[in-house]
Image (cartoon, helix red, strand yellow):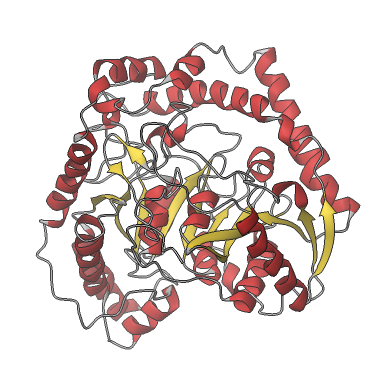
Amino acid sequence: MKPDRRALLTASAALLLTRATSAQPLQAMSTINIEERSLAELQADMAAGRTSARQLVAAYTDRIARIDRDGPRLASVIELNPDAPAIAQALDDELKAKGPRGALHGLPILIKDNIATRDRMQTTAGSLALIGSQPAEDATIVQRLRAAGAVILGKTNRSEWANIRSTSSSSGWSARGGLTRNPYALDRSASGSSSGSAAAAAASLCAAAVGTETDGSILSPSSVCGLVGLKPTVGLLSARGIVPIAHSQDTAGPMARSVRDCALLLGAMTDKPVDYAAALDVNALKGARLGVARQFFGFHEPSDRVFAAVLTALEAAGAILVDPVTMPAIDTIADAELTVLLYELKADLNAYLARLGGNASVKTLADVIAFNERSATREMPWFGQELFIKAQAKGPLTDAEYKDARALCLRVAATEGITAQLLAHRLDALIAPTGGPAWLTDLALGDHFVGGGSTTPAAVAGTPSITVPAGAVHGLPVGLSFFADTGSEARLLNLAYGFEQASRARRPPRYLARIETA
């Protein structure tokens, strides 16, 4: 592979962005403050007449051009919505005539490029195979966001096919969008697979963003990009219209710069809007019983020093720490989890592709595999598709291998894991480091994690988890995760809010070329 291949791929993504932004002339937005602004602050600005939805769209578009396409070149936004200015203008007119629809009225939101929109944007999961396919309708969560008054500003880049194509993939890379960079250190990974949503929200390229997760794809990029990210209970948010991996673990979720913004965005995407933000309490940690999942500590000494201080801060805020708490056998289910994902990938992706209709060039996973082989120089310059091939070889979901693997996953992660520990120790939640700091990007060899990631128990159990900025290692953010049982989103948001307000750990990115040395 020639060394300029990555530059060509990145240039291709930039061309897509240029075409999208050229539909509307950019305005000088120096008088509008959008950096690090919360949803509530932006809405207050609109209510006071200091800005409008149309001006916010122009301001974020301008910032994307300066930071994402030029300057640091994050490559986090794969495509802008050419209809966003007109949508924003209609929402401005509605605001004057009727008042706001809710907390998201007129606010520009970016969504991941596996979330379907029935408009002039693409929905590709980062793959060239899906370019030109047209979903029959907006994903259900997009319908909810539009009903809440959000402006879908564009789509974000992501790990192609959510890192399920190969064991040696690099998070944040897709054939369609190139490589997303971490805004805290540009040579570091933004993790994945919701890489672009994380980098864009961290860099204030949107009011907030939506990602998706199967195991770690919201939590890990949120952690390494200094964000709050919430993976809801599987099924709380509709998965209809989202390019799938596995129905037993897939979910969309909010990614934002604060717990309150995360709560507002989550509430807007539920079938019936829920005001999760209303009950947030700065004193939520007082008397809360938190189980310290020690099996996810001890992988990286600098990170452990950060989390030692975190535990002290939790106790100072009134939390009761039960230390240690162990989920037996959780580290033994990696093979079973992968078996479940491969079976469900074949079944669920085939069903999704069949619904795309006649304009889709691929109808099955087998078609995608064949497309990648034909387009290997563009699709597989860095890694292959051995996991796709293994998934294609799997049988139906009635196979004993699948049912046994799924039963094992649920028993270890849920029944004997999260649920058992919550009951045995009378816990409000378990806590652990979300993962280590961002690693150096290595397209030739793929991802290389520090270790200790705690996303698997909640992912496999289908229960919620939230990560909150906890500190930094050499300027690279690390997050603290709270996770609990099914339907505990409100409780987790409240605990996370209490910690956020006590720690104030988030720092905006500085777009360094590399980490600073002492």
* Residue at 83 percent of width and 51 percent of height: 325
Number of marks:
0
Please name whichever residue, 378 or 107, is drawn nearer the observer in this view of the structure. 378
| Visible residue check, residue 228 | no
Q: Position of residue 138 (x, y in %)?
A: 36, 45
Q: Which quadrant of the figure has residue 472?
A: bottom right
* Residue at 28 percent of width and 69 percent of height: 91
Would you place residue 42 above or below residue 226 in this image? below
Residue at the extreme front:
518
- Position of the N terminus by quadrant: top left
Please name whichever residue, 297 or 55, is drawn nearer the observer in this view of the structure. 297
Q: Position of residue 202 (x, y in %)?
A: 40, 63
Indicate left or right for 20 with 221 as reference.
left
Indicate left or right for 416 with 106 as reference.
right
Q: Which quadrant of the figure has residue 413?
A: top right
| Visible residue check, residue 500 | yes
* Residue at 20 percent of width and 64 percent of height: 66
Q: Position of residue 41 (x, y in %)?
A: 41, 80
Would you place residue 332 above or below residue 483 in this image? above
* Residue at 57 percent of width and 40 percent of height: 215
Residue at the extreme right:
424
Q: Position of residue 451 (x, y in %)?
A: 60, 43
Residue at the extreme bottom:
48
Would you place residue 481 above or below residue 103 in this image? above
